Amino acid sequence: MSNVMKEYFLDLDRAAKDPARKVAWCTSVGPAEILRAMGFEVFFPENHGAMLGATRVCMETIPVANAHGYSPEICSYLTSDIGAYMKGITPLTKAFGIEEIPRPDVLVYNTNQCKDVMHWFEYYASEFNAPIFGIHPPTNLPEIKPEYIDDVARQFEALIHFLEPVIGHPMNKEKLKSTVALSLEATNLWSDVLNMAQAAPSPMTFFDSTVYMGPIVVLRGTEIAVKYYKDLLKDLKEKIQKNHSAIPKENKRIYWDGMPVWGRLRAQSNIFKENKACVVASTYCNSWIFSDFDPENPLPSMAKAYIKIFINRNDQYKEDYIEKMVKDFKIDGVIFMAARTCPNNSNASYNLPRKLKDKGIPTIIIDGDLCDLRCYSDEQSTTLIEAFLETI
Amino acid sequence: MAVTEEIYWGVDCGSSEIKVVALDGQGNILLKRKQKTLFPLQDHVRLALAGESGDLSPFRNEGSHDIKEGHKIIATGYGRKYIRFAHDALTEIKAHFIGVQKQCDLKDAYSIIDIGGQDSKIIAACNNKVDQFAINRKCAAGTGAYIEELGHRLEVPLKDMTELARGNDKELSLNSFCTVFSGQEVIKTLMNGERIENIIYALYSSVVKRVMEMTAITTDMVVFSGGVLEYHSELVNMFIRKLEENNANMTCILSPNAQYCGAIGAAEYGFKSS
């Protein structure tokens, strides 16, 4: 894994320094396939935000963004990342020896997950004087109507027209098909990988998956991601055959809704391990399953896949989805992580935990954040998680 | 051959005080005592266990294997993980539930309201187990720390608060979620010449509101536990009035040894699991 991510970042760094190559910035569930098919190297600022969180460097950079007018209440990926840029630092330096994030030739965002990505990308478009394009799909959908798909597919067509002069050549339709095919293969493999945790005991935890997910976020549409997930799947199948348990003496199976608390992955992982509980599935890691991709029908199928994502749906869909996951993964209880700075990825605010509880599914809410550890209490979260595990 | 004496210790290591309870081999309460939470924590827990006798010999070393034979120590409270010589630990949610259940022996569904130094809890129990629970979120409002901080600002000793609150002649309210902002509201109210009795009443009223909004109480019985409620009887009365206003069939009781419920629950857990 570390080599895959290292090579990805080193190549991005080379691309940023090579006038013949173009770098596009893209949101994590944005149309990366279009950018890759046209020949852009793709950088994902949210992935950078997660690195700032996991390394806890964000605790130095969020206050910088706050002091420059970006509220502590908005997306802490944004504040972590913009603060790091203002401060002139990146975790890529320590991890891979890369001095700075790759300069964008174009920025493409999709508000299918939130509007903060728009503000975030607009900051950099202004800073780098680079062209920017936003996809604005319908949001919070109870169902996926054909007109929604048409709308977004047309926005993708407009995006391609916008990108052609930036890259200097038209879109090669065959290349788009083959890129979507690779993305589909990788995403199906990713789905298979996550489903390995249906085994009891599970060979993997949610905390492992937050590491495994790197390539499906940043390398969709490449052979590299396909190979990585084929190898990982083989490895996990072998573990299941050997009855390998990620949590020794696993006796409780938990579903995690909401973002990871990146700076506390190890500490939280240990709480579950000490209590013989395995977090076997999550909303977050499943968010990169795009089974609707169709290489023969690339733009409409991408439109469907990218508006269909969990975060872009209404509460009834979310309730049904979690209920199904509880059955499929034999879950004993659901933890909702309410992220202070990411309301769109927090599903505890509109009574969903209580609705599930009324259906006999134990739930608990813990307060925290994806990056900003000022919003997280180790003591309180530990007590809540342990008391929950004692109760179920 | 001499029979080894069995003692089951419960240590509730809270943010303000360390509470210690010992049960005998039949589960009867032998003693209870408390001291301020001081650091290094392990040393002070050991002193609390030893009590006035000062005999540290049953609790002499780091590991639970060094505890004197027959003694079993169960830790709870926010400091539970730092008492390395304890044989086991459980959360304060479970400990308070066991402590209340042992002392009150309730058959029907009930809820516990516990206000501790740094958190407040509502625990719903039925069929002799914890059904669900809620803990205050994000801030100290509604906890002992909140009462302590505002008492400090008002220069009112905690022991005088109940009597002062009973002397109110007006129902003021403090609106803020935040202890600091509440402090500012209090100062502003004082500047307007408000009586201290009315301010203390408003402070209690704020605690009731913060706790009651944590989760809906659906049982017809509520048991109060924890040190804050044991020592602020007017606060308990205000809770009772609010609960009865919401449910005409409500019955409320203050648990015996309310401040020690967590420690009693921990000791009982050790007794029952041995």
Image (tube, rainbow, N blue to C red):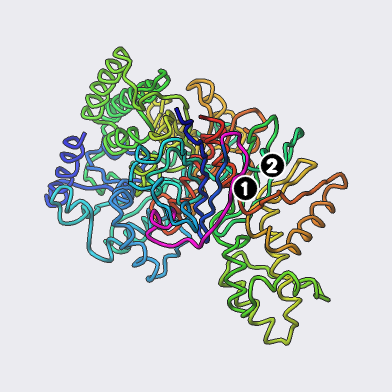
The answer to whether the residues at label 2 and label 1 have Cβ atoms under 8 Å apart is yes
Farthest residue, direction right = B248
Where is the C terminus of chain A found, in terms of image quarters?
top right
Would you say residue B196 sits in the magenta stretch?
Answer: no
Give the magenta range. B25-45
Mark 1, chain letter? B
Residue at x 42%, y 65% (from the top left corner): A70
B150 relative position to B109: left or right? left
A337 relative position to A160: left or right? right
- Quadrant of residue A354 within the rendered picture: top right
| Placement of B153 over or under A50, stated as above or below | below
First-in-chain label (2 vs 1): 2
Farthest residue, direction front = B1
**Marking on residue B103:** 2
Residue at x 28%, y 31% (from the top left corner): A221
Report which residue position mark 1 lands on: B261
Asked which secondary structure carries label 2, the reply is helix
**Residue A330 image offset from top left, x and y in percent:** 50, 21
- Kindly tell me whether residue B255 is visible in this rendering: yes
Q: Amino acid at mark 1?
A: Cys
